[in-house]
Image (tube, helix red, strand yellow):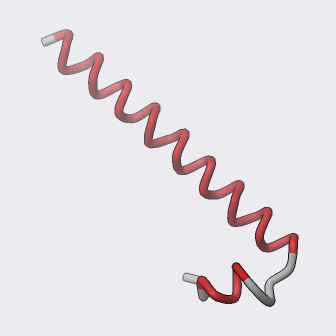
Amino acid sequence: MMNYNYMMGGGGAGVMLFAWIIYVLVAALLMLGIAALWKYINKK
């Protein structure tokens, strides 16, 4: 794991953008996973 302060401060815009892309991807995967689980549970 990278240091959080480094990502926020001295890392620069490129690292910040990279961190945001990862964050958005993880959030989207979480939403898809929850939706799939919800459909699976409701099917039962």
Please provide percent x and percent y for residue 17: 79, 63
x%, y% of residue 4? 60, 83
Is 39 positioned to the left or the right of 18 in the image? left
Quadrant into which the C terminus falls: top left
Quadrant housing residue 12: bottom right
Q: Say above or below: 10 vs 34.
A: below
Q: Quadrant for the N terminus, please.
A: bottom right
Which residue is found at the position 39% from the left and 35% from the top?
Answer: 33
Total numbered labels: 0
Is 9 rendered above or below residue 44? below
Q: Is residue 13 above or below residue 30?
A: below
Left or right, residue 34 beside residue 22: left
Q: Residue at (45%, 35%) from the top-left corner?
A: 31
User: Which residue is most to the left?
Assistant: 44
Q: Say which quarter of the image contains residue 7.
A: bottom right
Q: Residue furthest right?
A: 13
Q: Residue at x 28, y 28 (%)?
A: 37
